[in-house]
Image: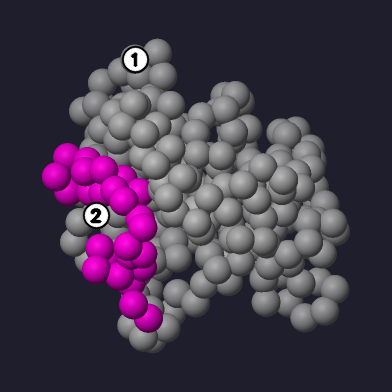
Amino acid sequence: MKNKIKQLFEQQLNDWELAKNNYKALERVKVKTLDVNGHPYKVQFNPARITSSAAKVDPQSIQERKCFLCSENRPPEQKGLPFIERYTILINPYPVFPRHLTIPALEHTPQLIVSRFGDMLDLAQQLADYVVFYNGPKCGASAPDHFHFQAGNKGFLPIENERNWKNTIRIESENKQEMLNRFQQIYNTLPLQPDDVEPMLNILTWYENGKWITCLFPRKKHRPACYSAEGDANLLISPASVDMGGVFITPLEKDFEKITAEDIAGILDEVNLK
Ligand SMILES: [Zn+2]
């Protein structure tokens, strides 16, 4: 799998203009580090992410657009690798990580983790160089109508190196069934908001030294107040798994310049369930 993904990247960055340009641009993005709650958080100014951060995910907007994860609507240049006959591994053409994958289900089916957490563990084991993540339908997924995971290369998210990360429920085990049981137990205790089909959640999972590590981020809010605030209080930040793992993405330069550690701590307090 490792070599196949490496080859996929080489081929796509060679043949697909959009991906080539965006990965090249990523090498030059501005990054700053802030101390938030005693942890190092990176802030990345990434203009290509505006589509995702500003994505309209209300049911009507979703219904009116063509799903970009369905195979018939994908750009012809975008190639994929099959994974357990249920998913396709694709290069994400709007990267946050130097190596960033999107892994949609083959069929157009809603973002819903509960029956697929085992697939997430399998994926993390197979993609041992990557951190696999899941954004709930109201927690940063820009295609809530088409199930997908994402993955980014290890060595990028600050959370990987910090055992006592704030605001997360961390589970780890060498045993897949134990991971599934623990996940299910926690999942069952999380509140379900009216009209929702799953508790609001971001999940990061990776596999190292023969065991899985999963960080769950139960959420109470999709987008912070600053997202829609007027004037100087406005920050276009739509937090998802990557932000929870310690890399805040700002598609606008003005936000990159002005965002402070206090802003980030405030956003985390606002969107995370205690
Ligand atoms: Zn679709």
Q: Residue at x 57, y 47 (%)?
A: 23
Which residue appears farthest toward the top when viewing the image? 209
Q: Is residue 81 visible?
A: yes
Q: Position of residue 166 (x, y in %)?
A: 62, 37
Q: Position of residue 45 (x, y in %)?
A: 72, 54
Query: What residue range appears in magenta?
Result: 65-90
Residue in the foreground of this view, choosing between 218 and 97? 97
Tag 2: amino acid: Ala
Q: Residue at x 27, y 65 (%)?
A: 70
Q: Is residue 164 magenta?
A: no
Task: Judge whether 9 appears above or below 248 on screen.
Answer: above
Residue in the foreground of this view, choosing between 111 and 63? 63
Residue in the foreground of this view, choosing between 100 and 222? 100
Picture disc at residue 105: 2
Determine whether label 2 and label 1 are within 8 Å by CB.
no
Q: How is the image coloured?
A: one colour
Instruction: Please name which of the two marks, 2 or 1, marks the residue nearer to the observer.
Output: 2
Picture disc at residue 210: 1
Task: Judge whether 156 appears above or below 237 on screen.
Answer: above
Q: Is residue 67 magenta?
A: yes
Residue in the foreground of this view, choosing between 82 and 247? 82
**Disc 2: CA contacts within 10 A as few (<14), some (14-19) or many (>=20):** many
In the figure, residue 147 lies in which quadrant? bottom left
The residues tagged by marks 2 and 1 sit, at their Cα atoms, a distance apart of 26 Å
